[in-house]
Every structure is written in structure tokens, then in C-alpha cells.
Image (cartoon, rainbow, N blue to C red):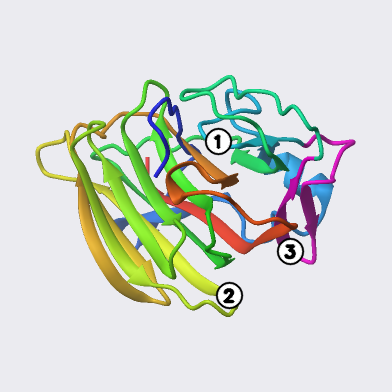
């Protein structure tokens, strides 16, 4: 969960219709393929460096990374590694985002170039495998719209061995469901399925961990809102402080985004 100066979102694509035994069947369209972390060239086809709005958010890490700077954003073997390293500056700069904390870390964030817009004519699935440390850091995979909220956190870790599934309808109307998360840094799968409710205004979000549905939440008024998919390694903030004194590594692999319908 992020302090709420947040603008976040996720994805968009194209659709196919297949004819099968006389009926029209809506086919899945792969918006981001599961091999998008196989090389930097493939990564840069589907993903952009940093947050959609820049380098700072509401924690104590400043995001760094570009096509020529891979110190904190590393891609290879179909795995994305986001790396947070404490800075040695004795007088740390201040974040440009509320609540303007001191910047104690250099870290990494990426976002998908395509956006997600849930409508009555489509549904979306976001999935991947994650190795997440949990001590005073906020590694996240989430969706939210420009002009926050809405927001839906598919993966968030806040200083305990739990993953938080969150949906923000307003800054105070928040639904959170926690699922126990192993502390051994092994990879575990997370998935969210987003579908429009019959009122054509709200979005149902089914959250899965290791192929088991762990929570169902509802985003009020999420239909038609263009959203980003962001993967970031933020430090301290609402997860508490002080953060780790050494390097922290958050690994993500086999992330895939698909859309069914138009």
C-alpha cells in the first residue's frame, strides 16, 4: 500500500474473434508475454523504466534506471531483478512526493508500456512469479489510475511474512486481505483476474496465490479507467523503518498480461 500521492495503473491491447462450430469465441490476446524479461531488447519492447511519473514516490528510495544504467534494474534469464542499495550521502535529498521523506536508497521500478482498461466487453489476467523479501520494504505489483485512486495491489509486503492484496476505492475506503508468505525467498505465483460487474461500473478482482484463490475484492467505478502495471521496490514508508542496512533484491519472472474480449 503506498502513501496516497499515488498515480498508478496498468495495460492495453488488441483482440481476436475466432469462429468455432458456428459460434463466435473471444480469444485471449497476449499484451505482455511471459518472456518479456529474457533480454533488455525484449524488456524495452514491453516495459519502461521507473514510475510513469518519474523517479520518486512516497518512500525513502529514489528509482534509477535507463537503457544505459542497469545498476538497479537487471534483466536476464527471463527474470527481472530490482535492487535497492543504501546511499552513502551524509545529507540525503528529500523525495519530491508526499510526504517528502529523506532518500536513503537507490532502487528500481518499471511499468508496462500498455495500459489496462476493464470494460463490459473484456477481462484481464495479470500473472507472474515473485521472490520477495519482506523486511521494511514495499515491493509491489499493482494497478492504479492517473488521478489516484483506483488502485489494486496484487503483491505487497510490509515488514511481515504476509502478502497484502489491496483495493483502494478512496484513500479511506480500503479492502485488504493477507496471505501468509514464506520467508525463504523462494518463488511463488500471484495472479489477478479483473472483470466488469453487471452494473458496468465496478470491477471484480479475484486474487490468486500459488493457483489458489485467496481473495475477491471490488473496485468501485474502476470500469473504463486506464491503469498502469507497475513493479517497484520501495523502501520504508508504510512498511516501517529503519530499512535494511545492505543490498535488497526483489526478483520477478514469467510476468504475463492477457486480455479476453475487446
Q: Residue drawn 75% across and 35% down?
A: 64
Name above or below for residue 58 compared with residue 85: above
- Residue projecting furthest to the left: 199
Nearest the viewer among 121 and 108 is: 108
Question: Disc 1 designates what residue?
Answer: 114
Name above or below for residue 8 compared with residue 85: above
Circle 2 — which element? loop
Q: CA distance from mark 1 to mark 2?
A: 25 Å
Q: Residue drawn 82% across and 54% down?
A: 39
Q: CA distance from mark 1 to mark 3?
A: 19 Å
Residue 121 rendering spot, x and y as whole percentages: 27, 41
Question: Disc 3 designates what residue?
Answer: 78
Question: Disc 2 designates what residue?
Answer: 187
Nearest the viewer among 152 and 174 is: 174
Residues marked 1 and 3 touching at CB (< 8 Å): no
Q: Tell me the magenta residue range.
A: 65-87
Amino acid at each position: 500500500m503506498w502513501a496516497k500521492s499515488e498515480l498508478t495503473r496498468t495495460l492495453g491491447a488488441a483482440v481476436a474473434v475466432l469462429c468455432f462450430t458456428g459460434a463466435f469465441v473471444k480469444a485471449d490476446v497476449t499484451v505482455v508475454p511471459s518472456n518479456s524479461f529474457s533480454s533488455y531488447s525484449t524488456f524495452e519492447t514491453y516495459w519502461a523504466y521507473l514510475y510513469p511519473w518519474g523517479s520518486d514516490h512516497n518512500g525513502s528510495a529514489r528509482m534509477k534506471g535507463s537503457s544505459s544504467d542497469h545498476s538497479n534494474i537487471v534483466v536476464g534469464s527471463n527474470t527481472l531483478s530490482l535492487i535497492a542499495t543504501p546511499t552513502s550521502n551524509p545529507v540525503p535529498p528529500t523525495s519530491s512526493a508526499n510526504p517528502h521523506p529523506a532518500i536513503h536508497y537507490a532502487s528500481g521500478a518499471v511499468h508496462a508500456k500498455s495500459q489496462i482498461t476493464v470494460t463490459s466487453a473484456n477481462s484481464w489476467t495479470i500473472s507472474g512469479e515473485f521472490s520477495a523479501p519482506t523486511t521494511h520494504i514495499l515491493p509491489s505489483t499493482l494497478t492504479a489510475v492517473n488521478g489516484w485512486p483506483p488502485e489494486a495491489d496484487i503483491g505487497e509486503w510490509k515488514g511481515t511474512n504476509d502478502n497484502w492484496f489491496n483495493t483502494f476505492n478512496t484513500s479511506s475506503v480500503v479492502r485488504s486481505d493477507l496471505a501468509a508468505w514464506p520467508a525463504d525467498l523462494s518463488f511463488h505465483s500471484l495472479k489477478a483476474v479483473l472483470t466488469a460487474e453487471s452494473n458496468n461500473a465496478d470491477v471484480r478482482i479475484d486474487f490468486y496465490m500459488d493457483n489458489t484463490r485467496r481473495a475477491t475484492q471490488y473496485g468501485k467505478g474502476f470500469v473504463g479507467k486506464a491503469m498502469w502495471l507497475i513493479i517497484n521496490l520501495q523502501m520504508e514508508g508504510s512498511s516501517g523503518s529503519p530499512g535494511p542496512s545492505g543490498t535488497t533484491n526483489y526478483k520477478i519472472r514469467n510476468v504475463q498480461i492477457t486480455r479476453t474480449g475487446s
